[in-house]
Every structure is written in structure tokens, then in C-alpha cells.
Amino acid sequence: MEREGYRENQAIAIWRYARISPLKARQVLRLIHGKDVETALYTLKALHKKAARMAEKLLFSALANAENKGLRVEKLYVKKAVADRGPMYKRWIPRAYGRATPIRRRTSHLTIILEEKND
């Protein structure tokens, strides 16, 4: 089974509707893009951000998917780590003189794709 942009030597993990803005998530995901899995995990452990905890969980999920597919974990690297924009939760907060101000809670779709290195 080969979908567009997805091959048999890859493992994918997707977190949809994550309650974090894509801008904040991209800051963290940019740091692990292209690194091997072990280095990426050390990088995420050192960061003190909510997005780092979310990316760490997602990376562990992608690792579990890779093991399930029979890929060699020691040869994996982060091929793609992206945060796409999800739907916004829109609320209203009351203000002075009967006015209202909108509140927009942004969500993200986080994706991590791991791939085996070719020697």
C-alpha cells in the first residue's frame, strides 16, 4: 500500500485537533526536523514548552508504529515534522458598555514521519 508521499519504509503519527496554536508548535517541530530519533528525543526533553511534550508523545507514537511495521529503530530519522492549522474554537467574552470581544482558540494538526536511512 503506497499513498502519495508515503512509502513502506516510513512510519507516520498524526495528532489531530491538538489544543495548541500552529505557530507555537512549529517552533518546536523545526528543531527536530531531519535529526535521528535519539537526538530528537534528547532535544525535546531539554525544552520547557508545552509543544515539546506534545511532540515527544507524537514521536513515541511514531516509534511504536515503526516497530509494529518491522522497521529498524536505530536507523530511523525524522523525515517530516509539521504543524498544520486546524479549526478555531470561537467564543465571546463580555466587555464594558455591553460590547463583546471575540476569543479565538487555535488548534493544530501535528504530523511526524519517520524514515529509515539508506546506507
Image (cartoon, grey):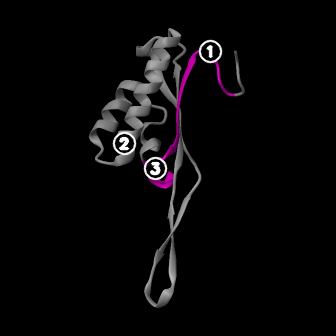
Q: Residue at x 58, y 50 (%)?
A: 86
Q: Nearer the viewer, residue 87 or 65?
A: 87
Q: In this orientation, does residue 102 appear?
A: yes
Circle 1 residue: 8
Which residue is tagged 3? Answer: 19
Q: Is residue 36 visible?
A: no
- Helix, strand, or loop for circle 1? loop
Q: Residue drawn at (53%, 48%), measured in percent from left and top?
A: 108
Q: Quadrant of the N terminus?
A: top right
Q: Which residues are magenta?
A: 5-27
Q: Residue furthest front?
A: 98
Magenta-span inclusion, residue 113:
no
**Pointer 2: what residue?**
52
Q: Kindly check if marks 2 and 3 are in contact, taking CB atoms under 8 A apart as contact.
A: no
Q: Position of residue 77 (x, y in %)?
A: 47, 24
Left or right of 91 on screen, residue 73: left
Q: Residues within 10 Å of mark 2 (few under 14, many from 20)?
A: many
Q: Residues within 10 Å of mark 1 (few under 14, many from 20)?
A: few
